Image (cartoon, coloured by chain):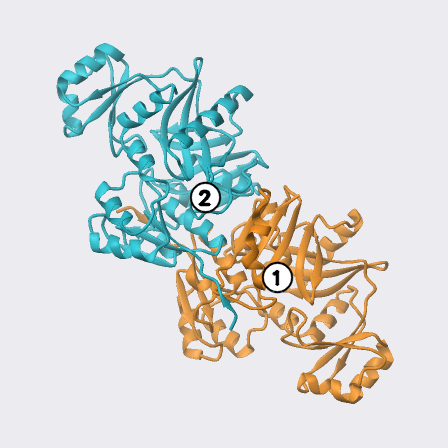
Chain colours: A cyan, B orange
């Protein structure tokens, strides 16, 4: 027998499509993955070496999981703090807790960004009706009330107009802490996917232009039609955010392009839907870049070799796949989800144009 | 609950690196894979949804496997006929039996190619010492004696020179049927990866230039430095081979570039080591192309967007990975093999140049 090679096992919290695609990227690098997810048939469950189906308050399961892996990462930022504490007793979590702490709460996130000197929408903390009145007096209407935590794809949000019934609006949110954000007049929404390795080297992908429908990302097109100066600004601010957080891994930064420059909408300390185009636009995609970073490998080449339009396949669109792939210039990515729900992300297409 | 989507399950005979990379490609398309392999810890075992560890003469296991999948494909051509018969009672094998029958035996393969009007090395059947004497009289020396079946990576081959002891040479091959092949004076060896779908549409990748060390492929470089006419010839002959076999899937065709034009060395009815560059040189790689073809999807775009040099990582080279990846322009592919052996294919690098 020859010499034994010990490949690291990567723990991933969450087995959705992002976990699945991280697992695929890890497979290309010869690594094993251990997925932790409350669901039985998550997309990543079928293709990862190890799988734990358990809830995030099952501390025995979390402990066994943590002991079985060499590094833990995650596909979503809303992981309970207690679960992270249980894992961190045994193994490192990457990206780090600072990144999670900052991005889990819209208020803390906005404060972090403004402290860095970056522009955000005007915002105010709202924990009761008096706060709401004060916030509206400061920010005005139309504005948007969001839960500070756990929102995604437009969930946990309500638009505040001059005629909105303020007496009842907070009840909709079950008295969760909220943030009121002013509306931004923007020309387009872009996002930039950045990566930072253990040595502090930073690499950013070209910004993509995002188009949403019903609060859900529908398409990302690269390159975004922005000036070279804005491209540079986007890279610099992403580097600034990652350096401040001593970040290791891939980050998604959503930006509004306004006449006053780039305004940061939000940051996601993970691979991001708006970065799926990298799978067919670059030699090393965001998923492999993330796995490289967290396992201590050097970052790969994120140069864009092709112009790509990424389109999410939502809900029943998956039954009309021929409409998407009857075009030789498209790469198809499906997540293996077994149940169609309206608006559910079932897959995506990367079209080279 | 929403509507249920039933994704096909793909059966793959063989769980080596080719099976693993086929499985990765199938994962991107949302499919499940069921691997059949005699080894416990094959590279594909860790990342496929289902795994059967059994020998190819275990007919109960073959039957269960066949019943559990929607289509069967394979990563190597030397599958026993009896195993194929057992599987084919229940499910279609793709590429078909003709392709396997033709490529499993060098004699039948050469006859098939010459019947198609394609050039090969001069060859003669050798089953005993008289055959060998006759063959040498016809073909001359130096020439090369190969077992008709089961050879790979230079195994099962012996060079015949004018001073070779013919009395003992056949003993080395345990009296297996052999073929004597004349030496070709060639300028380079290239290979071309073709694909054909159920409707007979054909798509070929750009030919790559191969360099071997000790009988094992070391590098493939695209584009091969050949004339446009030879590129066209390579595509046409690959189409001819696939059409004649009513082939569905990806095929590898190895060619010698000589002053008399292209000479076919051998065909492999499967994804091929010399096609690994497509993972980072094209939107749709050979693995996805194969999965698309056998599941009835339209073929994807195989246009080369980058120039690539693929280098196999053999044996202990894997312990010196930094030498390979300390170059931002490289994509790394590792197979998760746990034991290093001399000359063993542990992974490969695709370098964009």
Farthest-out residue, front: A199
Is A31 placed above or below A160 here? Answer: below
Between B108 and A310, which is closer to the camera in this rendering?
A310
Horizontal and vertical percent for residue A197?
46, 40
Residue B203 in view (yes/no): no
Q: Is residue A162 left or right of residue A329?
A: left
Q: What residue is shown with label 2?
A: A293
Q: What residue is shown with label 1?
A: B247
Between A177 and B272, which is closer to the camera in this rendering?
A177
Q: How dense is the environment of label 2, judged by Cα within 10 Å: few (below 14), some, or many (20 and up)? A: many
Is B236 placed above or below A353 here? Answer: below
**Which chain is disc 1 placed on?**
B
What residue sits 27% from the left and 41% below the top?
A: A79
- Asked which secondary structure carries label 2, the reply is helix
What residue sits 81% from the left and 70% below the top?
A: B183
Both labels 1 and 2 in a single chain? no
Name which quarter of the figure residue A141 lies in. top left
Q: How dense is the environment of label 1, judged by Cα within 10 Å: few (below 14), some, or many (20 and up)? A: many
**Which chain is disc 2 placed on?**
A
How far separated are the C-alphas under marks 1 and 2? 42 Å
What residue sits 37% from the left and 47% below the top?
A: A19
Q: Nearer the viewer, mark 1 or mark 2?
A: 2
Residue B321 in view (yes/no): yes
Horizontal and vertical percent for residue A29?
49, 53
Whether residues under marks 1 and 2 lie with C-beta atoms below 8 angstroms apart, the answer is no
Is A315 placed above or below A135 here? Answer: below
Q: Is residue A126 left or right of residue A68?
A: left
Horizontal and vertical percent for residue A56?
23, 48
- Asked which secondary structure carries label 1, the reply is loop
């Amino acid at each position: 027998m020859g010499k034994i090679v010990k490949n690291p096992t990567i723990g991933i919290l969450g087995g959705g499509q992002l976990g699945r695609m991280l697992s695929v990227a890890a497979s290309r690098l010869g690594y094993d993955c251990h997925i932790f997810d409350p669901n039985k048939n998550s997309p990543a469950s079928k293709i990862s070496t190890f799988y734990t189906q358990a809830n995030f308050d099952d501390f025995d399961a979390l402990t066994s999981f943590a002991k079985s892996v060499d590094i833990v990462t995650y596909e979503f930022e809303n992981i309970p703090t207690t679960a992270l504490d249980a894992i961190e007793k045994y193994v490192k979590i990457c990206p780090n807790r600072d990144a999670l702490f900052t991005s889990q709460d819209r208020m803390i996130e906005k404060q972090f960004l403004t402290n860095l000197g970056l522009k955000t929408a005007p915002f105010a903390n709202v924990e009761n009706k008096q706060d709401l009145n004060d916030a509206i007096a400061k920010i005005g209407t139309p504005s948007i009330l969001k839960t500070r935590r756990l929102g995604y794809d437009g969930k946990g949000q309500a638009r505040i107009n001059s005629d909105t019934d303020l007496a009842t609006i907070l009840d909709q949110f079950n008295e969760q802490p909220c943030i009121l954000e002013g509306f931004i007049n923007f020309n387009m929404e872009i996002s930039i996917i950045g990566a930072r390795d253990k040595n502090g080297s930073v690499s950013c992908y070209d910004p993509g232009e995002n188009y949403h429908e019903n609060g859900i990302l529908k398409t990302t097109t690269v390159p975004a039609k922005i000036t070279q100066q804005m491209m540079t600004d986007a890279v610099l601010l992403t580097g600034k955010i990652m350096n401040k957080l001593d970040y290791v891994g891939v980050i998604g930064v959503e930006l509004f392009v306004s006449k006053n420059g780039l305004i940061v909408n939000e940051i996601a300390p993970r691979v991001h839907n708006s970065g799926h185009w990298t799978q067919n636009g670059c030699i090393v995609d965001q998923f492999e870049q993330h796995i490289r970073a967290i396992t201590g490998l050097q970052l790969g080449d994120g140069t864009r070799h092709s112009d790509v339009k990424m389109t999410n396949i939502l809900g029943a669109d998956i039954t009309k796949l021929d409409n998407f792939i009857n075009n030789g210039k498209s790469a198809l990515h499906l997540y293996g989800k077994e149940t169609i729900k309206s608006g559910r992300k079932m897959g995506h297409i990367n079209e080279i144009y």
